[in-house]
Amino acid sequence: MILYTMIVRSKDGLALSASTDFNDEGLRDVKESKKYLKILAKKTFQFPDRCMLSTGNHTIYLLTALGVSYLALSDLSYPTVLGFSFLNELMKEFLGKYLALTVNQARRPYSFIEFNNIIHSARQRYNKPQSLSTRINLAELSEEIRLRPPHIITLAEVQPLNGFHTINVSKASVGPPLRLEPVSWFGYGITLIAVLLSLIDILRAEAASNYSFDDFDGPGVAFHSIIFAVEAVIRILQVAIFWHGGKRYLKYMWISVAVLLLSGVSVYDLRDRWQNGLRLFVTGALVYLTICRKHELRLPDYNV
């Protein structure tokens, strides 16, 4: 018979729903097998879409589809085809009831605990195989299992070592990724000025490249053209880091500041003090805004 069922999000093992009508108090072997099932639930992204694991006392069935994994714990004598047929039915019901977007946005464990009613109903039917009326489907599934046998997971792959679970869970965060706070009006203004300065530098780079060497008194028009073009690109990079990268890419922001300071010294005499001052101010403002821009607050991560 099927003893316990659990549905998890594959990428991070977040529990979405589970059986709530099975009491394992006093059943030590069932508790031990459930421990393996919960460890496996955190690692489903590592395995094929259809797997089996024997704990010695029980069998764990695993089915993964469209980012959701379905696990069932049963007696060793329970037919394999019925175990996967049970999970197939849960999969169809779950995918028909919940959108992928809803699953991806789940933040708390057991966000779909109401699905337990469907799990309970399916378990009752599959624990009385004689009452099932899906012989044709079972025959088709039996043939599919024969042609493509489920992957056999060994206990060593989910075995706790020294009392600790050595689980290599992916670093994907639970729920939607963190988002940066909205840009302030000051940020919009600095961004606009930075873009305008970049356009001016591009125009000056093009103009410098059109001078003849005889008409220009200095280290060379090619050199100045390159400096103006580099400043334009670096300033746009600063804007991109401020808008999309935040403090994660702060080191690149500091590198860009160093490049702008060096290039600014190289063409210092070609600008008046107001132009040089404005560029320094915009560069410093972008660094300050990037450091101060925080991520939006959200509920704590749950990875159970």
Image (cartoon, rainbow, N blue to C red):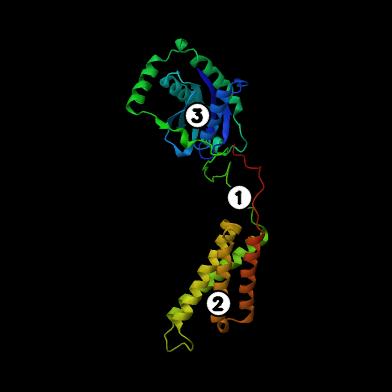
Q: Secondary structure at mark 3?
A: strand
Which residue position is annotated with label 2?
262
Mark 3–mark 2 Cα distance, whole angstroms, equals 58 Å
In this rendering, position of residue 274 left or right of residue 81: right
Q: Are marks 1 and 3 in contact (CB under 8 Å)?
A: no
How many marks the image carries: the answer is 3
| Kind of residue sitting beneath label 1 | Arg
Residue 246 falls in image quadrant: bottom right
Instruction: Using the image, determine if residue 93 lies above or below residue 171.
Output: above
User: x, y (%) of residue 4?
Assistant: 55, 23
Q: Is there a contact, CB below 8 Å, between mark 3 and mark 2?
A: no
Q: Is residue 193 visible?
A: yes
Residue annotated with mark 3: 70
The foreground one among 70 and 202 is: 70
| Mark 3 or mark 2, earlier in chain | 3
Q: Nearer the viewer, mark 3 or mark 2?
A: 3
Q: At label 3, which amino acid type do we have?
A: Tyr
Q: Identify the amino acid type marked 2.
A: Leu
Which residue is label 1 attached to? 179
* Disc 3 packing (10 Å; few <14; some 14–19; many ≥20): many
Mark 1 and mark 3 lie on one chain; the one further toward the N terminus is: 3
* Frontmost residue, 60 versus 199: 60
